[in-house]
């Protein structure tokens, strides 16, 4: 067994996370990766993974993960002893229990994000359930370090109770909002009619709902239906909405007092001063970002030389041509390319921007990808 440079087997390698993990293990960690997925006829036979993979990672839809693990344990018939089994499912109790029924060392992982465009999980949260570890502990630590995520150690049952709130409740809330918007479209128009009147909070809620509705629906279905703690959470959510609706329908001063004291005051007390301050700060920062993204004129620039001094050289070109920058934001693509978005005031000289674009291309400092 090679604990330093193991062979990785991914069950579910044709899925979105399976593909991301293949790239991560092969490119970031330099490991041999074997994949099996029923959806990919060219993937390896399960026997190949059971014979060769030192680490077996399950990346499958929630509803089939635990039965799938049990099937692989039966196939392995003890050959998994001394190896490491992992999963990346959005629930943890059932998959971890299924892996523990094998003879492998076991840890459950849950990246709380869709497969990112970046090469690591930097800036994202990763739930880690250490179930049965001995010889593989140092390698798992190296894996977590390479992933660069914010790792949170948690027990499987506690994880699932938390996900009923963190994922299922949040998704259900925004799906319900989408339903109400759909029902009111006949009288008030669709989102194109409403968004010009948006608040920052409405814009963020619509963005979250759009994100959910544009992703793989099976994922969001399983998050609701395959976590045993979700029904009670949704009942409590419904009860809170009904409570607010009842007070508003009552409409008198007594109802207003109860709303202020119980709904608003109770919420403030439950959150606490520190959480309220941090949440307000986050909302303000996101609001500034949304405002910057509405700049009437903008340039998106790819910075090919990602090294100290590159941004200074890029900004110097704007200075040379007398162009003032109103906003500046950076991001990275899945391949790690560094992109900048520059926003400008409405009165910016279009000819000067054209000169900046030409100078950037001529010097090879930056490549303008889009102009708004």
Image: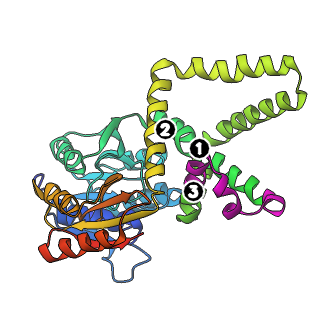
Residue at label 3? 220
Residue at label 2? 283
Query: Which secondary structure type mostly characterizes the magenta part of the structure?
Result: helix
Find the distance from the CA under tag 3 to the CA under tag 2.
25 Å
Q: Position of residue 121 (x, y in %)?
A: 30, 51
The tag on residue 274 is none
Marks 1,2: beta carbons within 8 A: yes
Residue at label 1? 201
- Residue drawn 20% across the image and 39% down it: 134
Segment colored magenta = 183-209
Query: In the rendered image, which quarter contains the C terminus?
Result: bottom left
- Residue drawn 70% across the image and 50% down it: 176
Q: In which quarter of the image is residue 312?
A: bottom left
| Residue 222 in sight in this render | no
Query: In the rendered image, which quarter contains the N terminus?
Result: bottom left
Find the distance from the CA under tag 1 to the CA under tag 2.
8 Å
Q: Earlier in the sequence, mark 1 or mark 3?
A: 1
Find the distance from the CA under tag 1 to the CA under tag 3.
23 Å
Marks 1,3: beta carbons within 8 A: no
Up the image or down, 61 lies above or below 244; here it is below
Circle 3: element type: helix
């Amino acid at each position: 067994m090679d604990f330093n440079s193991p062979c990785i087997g991914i069950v579910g390698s044709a899925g979105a996370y399976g593909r991301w993990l293949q790239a991560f293990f092969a490119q970031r960690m330099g490991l041999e990766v074997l994949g099996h997925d029923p959806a990919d006829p060219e993937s390896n036979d399960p026997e190949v993974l059971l014979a060769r993979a030192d680490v077996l990672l399950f990346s499958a839809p929630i509803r089939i993960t635990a039965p799938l693990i049990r099937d692989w344990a039966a196939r392995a018939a003890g050959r998994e002893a001394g190896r490491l089994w992992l999963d990346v499912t959005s629930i943890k109790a059932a998959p971890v229990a299924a892996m523990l029924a094998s003879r492998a060392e076991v840890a459950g992982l849950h990246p709380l994000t869709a497969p990112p465009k970046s090469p690591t999980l930097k800036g994202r949260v990763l739930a880690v359930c250490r179930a049965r570890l001995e010889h593989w502990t140092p390698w798992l630590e190296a894996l977590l370090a390479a992933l660069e995520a914010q790792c949170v150690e948690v027990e499987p049952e506690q994880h699932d109770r938390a996900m009923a709130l963190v994922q299922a409740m949040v998704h259900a809330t925004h799906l319900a909002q989408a339903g109400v918007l759909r029902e009111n479209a006949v009288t008030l128009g669709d989102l194109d009619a409403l968004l010009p009147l948006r608040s920052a909070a409405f814009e963020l809620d619509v963005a979250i709902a759009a994100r959910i509705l544009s992703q793989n629906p099976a994922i969001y279905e399983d998050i609701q239906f395959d976590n045993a703690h979700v029904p009670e959470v949704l009942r409590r959510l419904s009860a809170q909405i009904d409570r607010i609706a009842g007070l508003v329908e009552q409409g008198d001063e007594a109802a207003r007092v109860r709303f202020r004291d119980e709904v608003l005051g109770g919420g403030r007390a439950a959150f606490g001063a520190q959480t309220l301050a941090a949440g307000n700060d986050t909302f303000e920062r996101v609001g500034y970002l949304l405002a910057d993204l509405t700049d009437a004129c903008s340039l998106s620039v790819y910075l090919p030389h990602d090294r100290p001094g590159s941004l200074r050289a890029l900004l110097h070109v704007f200075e040379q041509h007398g162009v003032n920058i109103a906003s500046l934001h950076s991001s990275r693509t899945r391949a790690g390319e560094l992109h900048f978005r520059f926003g400008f005031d409405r009165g910016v000289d279009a000819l000067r921007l054209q000169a900046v674009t030409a100078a950037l291309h001529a010097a090879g400092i930056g490549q303008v990808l889009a102009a708004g």
